[in-house]
Amino acid sequence: MTPPRRNPNKRLQSLTLVITVGLAVALAGITYLSVTSLPYLATSPTTDPVFGALNACLLTAVPERVGFAVSRDASSVAAWSPSQLVVCAGTPPVPTTFPRTGITQAAWDGTGALWVASGTNDGGPSGLLRLEAGQFVERGPFAPAALVGTAKGVVALEPSGQLISLSATGEVSATRALPITRNVQLQTSSDGALVAVSGGGRFAVIDANTLASTPAEAPCPVQHVWWRAGAPLLVVECVDLALEINALNSESALAQPRRRIPATLVGPGGQYVTSCDVLPCSVEAPR
């Protein structure tokens, strides 16, 4: 018996279907990569709508940077290299250079003052310093592993795990020990009154002055935290769950599952910042 002959039209239709499906899959992959990569590629430091001019100032003054800090009103940015710290501010921004080595951390408080954690290898004062009238003044004999500005001072974490709240004069208002010491993130609320502490899946919210914990808690290991602007609310993201949590009473609600860029709320103006080329770039508020 002669085997039946295949219809050429059917074979062509099958081939067309395979090619169409393949193209659809490829297009979906390209679209996914474009959507997920766009927030990181769309803005360069000097064209950022918020920090572009400040970044251009810093790129010229300190081309090799190891860190940066943004003031709480987003009007000034400090960046440092192994040998100097530069503050850019004004319209147009003008750089002010401070020769100093050993800087590991920096933060601005709510009064507009810059704090830095510095080592001793430059022969100058060591520990925690505050910039006052153009001079760095020692405000603590230690170099913290993490530092965040608050309404009237800073909260600092020593490498031993001791958390310390300091006023503008360096007066210690409270201390407490943390159960974790590595990769701890400190983020301040928009009014500078509360600090979110996260790391190793743990999460807590503390009073910036007394360091007492609020009732806020998360039911899952926390990966990222964002403060909401103008309210004691946070968005907390775990592996497969996102919540909006009230920092004062721990009331929570499920947040929409979507991709959120890890970023920090700068201050009461509601600006969020992430790092691009060790400089600040603005990002949209977490939704």
Image: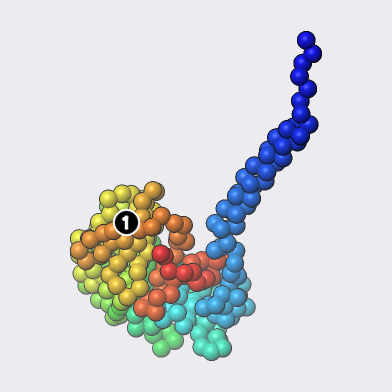
Q: Is residue 138 left or right of residue 212?
A: right
Would you identify the image quadrant in which residue 39 lies?
Answer: bottom right
Q: Amino acid at mark 1?
A: Leu
- Answer few, some or many: residues within 10 Å of disc 1's Cα (few below 14, many 20 plus, some between 14 and 19): few
Q: Is residue 101 left or right of residue 170?
A: right
Residue located at (31% from left, 49% from top): 220
Would you identify the image quadrant in which residue 254 lies?
Answer: bottom left
Would you identify the image quadrant in which residue 14 lies?
Answer: top right
Place of residue 75 in the rendered image (x, y in percent of width and height, measured from the top left): 46, 83
Q: Nearer the viewer, residue 25 or 120?
A: 25
Q: Nearer the viewer, residue 256 or 184?
A: 256
Place of residue 253 in the rendered image (x, y in percent of width and height, measured from the top left): 28, 58
Residue located at (31% from left, 61% from top): 244
Above or below, comparing residue 258 to residue 280 in the picture? above
Place of residue 91 in the rendered image (x, y in percent of width and height, measured from the top left): 53, 89
Q: Is residue 257 left or right of residue 10?
A: left
- In the rendered view of the protein, which quadrant contains the N terminus? top right
Above or below, comparing residue 24 to residue 5 in the picture? below
Residue located at (34% from left, 80% from top): 110
- What secondary structure is found at the residue carrying circle 1? strand
Residue that badge 1 annotates: 254
Above or below, comparing residue 33 to residue 62 in the picture? above
Residue 207 visible in the displayed image: yes
Residue located at (21% from left, 66% from top): 248
Q: Nearer the viewer, residue 53 or 251?
A: 251
Residue 98 visible in the displayed image: no
- Residue at the top extreme, as displayed: 1
- In the rendered view of the protein, which quadrant contains the C terminus? bottom left
Place of residue 194 in the rendered image (x, y in percent of width and height, measured from the top left): 27, 70
